């Protein structure tokens, strides 16, 4: 049910918090996003682009333990629906006429689901071929959720503690303990709770929240613009079987009003490289996010290639990428390639490492990152635009640094030395008030 904020009533914020304290399933999350204002027609069109003529999607109001909620029902058009393998789902998403962000998010969620199911069943990911990945309802839920986020213009997702449930459930291969193995695998590195009986979080729901969310924690400080409540199938007595979402604009700690430009992470111009805004220790003004570090040891790559690899990884969405010299067995000199990224882009960057280097394996480590929030402000140097990355804490600027790539481009355009343009950019930033201690 969309809220009516005191200003900009028709423009949703860019941050979304998912309340999974009662569990999460794909259809519940989709319903919550539609309830928050996402266009159901946009959702239907996106699902139709991937699986034409396969399903019907309808929404209706309902009640769960006395709480009003929206229920989204996905029904097959025909009774005999194929159980598509992961490779076919990947192809369908890749060939569909979808916005890039919808395709990337849907691919990431399905890839995570396929990977963990392959691990659970002890098969190669290419051999995953069963209803958990290819069913019509999973495609509708995953693509529908990603389309809803696109329609709401959400670029920052967080989730609270994930309730996974307890007890047992009957699966395709027999009786399974709850949480089922796929959910546990998808939630590795995330905080979960077994409160409640039954399967509260499904593999599809777990895949969506763990690939879409850039961090985990309580409801972050924000200016709320809309809320949505999505209903599960069962109406459990004494517990509202719902997923809630809160849409809003981030507000930094210590600031009682709106952030200039309307967004903490973007500063009204460009998104800062790195993970979205998160929560650190209460009131300390430092963001905490869950990140992934991908690593590979390489001893047989032409060193002239490394700069192109690092550039491709950064362009592909890495928060950072770097090399460290190491000494391997038998005295062979080598490098360790490290890539810091959000879980959402992990698989794409993994594939880049395997494609662009000579390694045959990639390690993965889940890490916590504490970072100062930042935004971008553009300054002008003789008609050339140069972005300045502004790091801040508790509403005060800590440092402001011109983007060196912009400085190089401006120097070429002006026909001046890079050093001179860099000095001019620093001076322009100071003139704009972007100095340590100033208010953001």
Image (tube, helix red, strand yellow):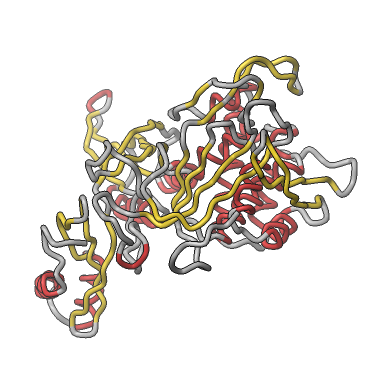
331 and 137: which is toward the camera:
137
Residue 353 image-quadrant placement: top left
What is the total number of numbered labels drawn onto the structure image?
Answer: 0
Please tell me which residue lies in front, 45 or 359. 45
Q: Quadrant of residue 38?
A: bottom right
Give the percent coordinates (x, y) of residue 176: 68, 16
* For residue 346, side relative to residue 378 (left or right): right
Query: Which residue sits at x=44%, y=33%?
Result: 361
> Does residue 239 lie above or below 214 as drawn?
above
| Quarter of the figure with the N terminus | bottom right
Q: Residue at x 57, y 25 (%)?
A: 164
At 60% from the left and 35% from the top, the residue drawn is 24
Residue 365 at what x, y percent from top left?
38, 31
Q: Quadrant of residue 137?
A: top right
Image quarter in which the C terminus is found: bottom left
The residue closer to the viewer here, 253 or 417, is: 253
Q: Seen in the image, is 77 located left or right of residue 32? A: right
| Extreme residue toward the right, this view | 79
Q: Is residue 237 left or right of residue 250?
A: right
- Above or below 165: residue 250: below
Q: Indicate left or right for 172 with 343 as reference.
A: right
């Amino acid at each position: 049910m969309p809220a009516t904020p005191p200003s900009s009533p028709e423009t949703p914020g860019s941050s979304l918090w998912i309340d999974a304290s009662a569990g999460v399933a794909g259809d519940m999350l989709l319903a919550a996003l539609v309830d928050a204002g996402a266009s159901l027609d946009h959702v239907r069109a996106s699902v139709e682009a991937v699986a034409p003529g396969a399903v019907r999607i309808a929404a209706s109001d309902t009640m769960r333990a006395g709480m009003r909620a929206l229920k989204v029902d996905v029904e097959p058009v025909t009774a005999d629906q194929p159980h598509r393998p992961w490779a076919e789902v990947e192809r369908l998403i890749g060939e569909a006429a979808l916005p890039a962000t919808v395709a990337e998010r849907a691919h990431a969620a399905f890839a995570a689901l396929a990977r963990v199911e392959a691990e659970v069943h002890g098969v190669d990911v290419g051999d995953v071929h069963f209803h958990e990945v290819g069913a019509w309802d999973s495609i509708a839920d995953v693509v529908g959720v990603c389309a809803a986020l696109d329609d709401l213009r959400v670029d920052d997702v967080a989730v609270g503690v994930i309730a996974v449930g307890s007890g047992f459930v009957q699966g395709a291969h027999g009786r399974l303990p709850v949480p089922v193995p796929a959910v546990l695998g998808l939630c590795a590195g995330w905080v979960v709770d077994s409160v409640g009986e039954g399967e509260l979080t499904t593999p599809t729901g777990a895949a969506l929240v763990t690939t879409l969310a850039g961090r985990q924690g309580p409801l972050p400080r924000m200016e709320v613009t809309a809320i949505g409540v999505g209903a599960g199938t069962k109406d459990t007595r004494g517990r509202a079987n719902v997923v809630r979402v809160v849409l809003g604009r981030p507000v930094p700690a210590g600031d009682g009003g709106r952030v200039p430009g309307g967004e903490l992470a973007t500063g009204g111009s460009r998104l800062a490289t790195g993970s979205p805004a998160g929560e650190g220790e209460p009131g300390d003004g430092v963001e905490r996010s869950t990140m992934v570090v991908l690593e590979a040891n390489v001893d047989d790559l032409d060193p002239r290639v490394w700069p192109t690899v690092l550039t491709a990884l950064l362009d592909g969405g890495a928060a950072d990428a770097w090399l460290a010299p190491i000494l391997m067995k038998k005295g062979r000199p080598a490098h360790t390639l490290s890539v810091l990224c959000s879980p959402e882009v992990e698989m794409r960057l993994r594939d880049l490492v395997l494609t662009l280097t000579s390694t045959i394996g990639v390690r993965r480590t889940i890490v916590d990152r504490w970072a100062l929030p930042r935004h971008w402000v553009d300054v002008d140097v003789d008609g050339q635009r140069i972005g300045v990355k502004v790091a801040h804490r508790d509403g005060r600027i800590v440092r402001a640094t011109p983007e060196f790539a912009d400085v190089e481009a401006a120097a070429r355009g002006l026909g001046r030395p890079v050093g001179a343009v860099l000095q001019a950019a620093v001076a322009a930033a100071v003139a704009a008030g972007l100095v340590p201690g100033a208010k953001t």
